[in-house]
Image (cartoon, rainbow, N blue to C red):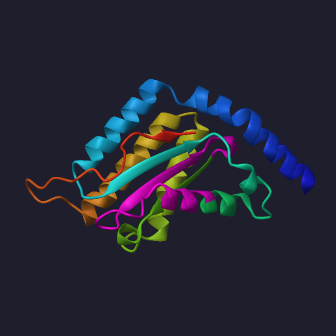
């Protein structure tokens, strides 16, 4: 168990930053920002993307399964970034952890109460499949498109209505 934790620690400390630089070029960030802006012009929800190279040390020493650790980190960042604090409780965080090639989607209660667990799992699986093929950018765009579809179905804008921008549209990369 200790060796597993040390291996994970080394992967997160030494490869995390390199993965971020290799995976996220400025033009990709611009395209993702544009996709979020375009999405938010069609519904009242907010989409936030967080891409992390590696986890903080405090997460790496936990005696939990990786899926639980990633979910815990995504939930913590959902709160810290204020994604939960939107007018209609319909913010969505798309979280990517490059060192583990892990992803998580956290939706606020306004949307999450209307969408089945299976729907979220389907979106996550499609992202995983795209990432495995090396189609990182396509996987993120697909997730934005699917979340947009859900937000348009449950929180459409009325004709002429404007969605005030409550959260930054550009992905946060660290």
Q: Is residue 132 shown above or below 166?
A: above
* Quarter of the image where the N terminus is located: bottom right
- Residue 165 falls within the magenta-colored stretch: no
Segment tinted magenta in the rendering: 73-101
- Residue 108 vs 26, above or below: the answer is below
> Most extreme residue toward the left, as rendered?
160
Please state if 14 lies on the left or on the right of 81 as rendered: right
Q: Is residue 102 left or right of residue 161?
A: right
Q: Residue at x 41, y 44 (%)?
A: 142
Indicate left or right for 2 with 107 as reference: right
State whether residue 128 is above or below residue 33: below
Measuring 46% from the left and 42% from the top, which residue is drawn there?
Answer: 140
Residue 74: x and y, percent?
56, 57
- Near-viewer residue (136 or 6): 6
Q: What is the quadrant of the C terminus in the image?
A: top right
Based on the picture, tell me whether residue 91 belongs to the magenta stretch: yes
Is 72 on the left or on the right of 83, as rendered? right
């Amino acid at each position: 168990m200790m060796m597993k934790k040390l291996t994970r620690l080394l992967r997160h400390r030494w490869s995390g930053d390199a993965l971020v630089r290799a995976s996220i070029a400025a033009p990709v960030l611009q395209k993702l920002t544009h996709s979020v802006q375009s999405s938010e012009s069609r519904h009242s929800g907010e989409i936030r993307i967080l891409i992390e190279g590696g986890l903080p040390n405090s997460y790496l020493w936990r005696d939990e399964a990786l899926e639980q650790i990633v979910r815990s980190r995504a939930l913590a960042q959902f709160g810290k970034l204020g994604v939960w604090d939107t007018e209609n409780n319909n913010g969505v965080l798309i979280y990517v952890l490059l060192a583990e090639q892990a992803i998580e989607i956290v939706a606020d209660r306004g949307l999450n109460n209307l969408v089945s667990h299976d729907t979220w799992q389907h979106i996550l699986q499609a992202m995983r499949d795209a990432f495995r093929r090396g189609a990182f950018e396509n996987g993120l765009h697909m997730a934005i498109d699917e979340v947009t579809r859900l937000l348009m179905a449950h929180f459409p804008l009325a004709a002429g209505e404007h969605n005030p921008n409550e959260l930054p549209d550009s992905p946060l990369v660290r």
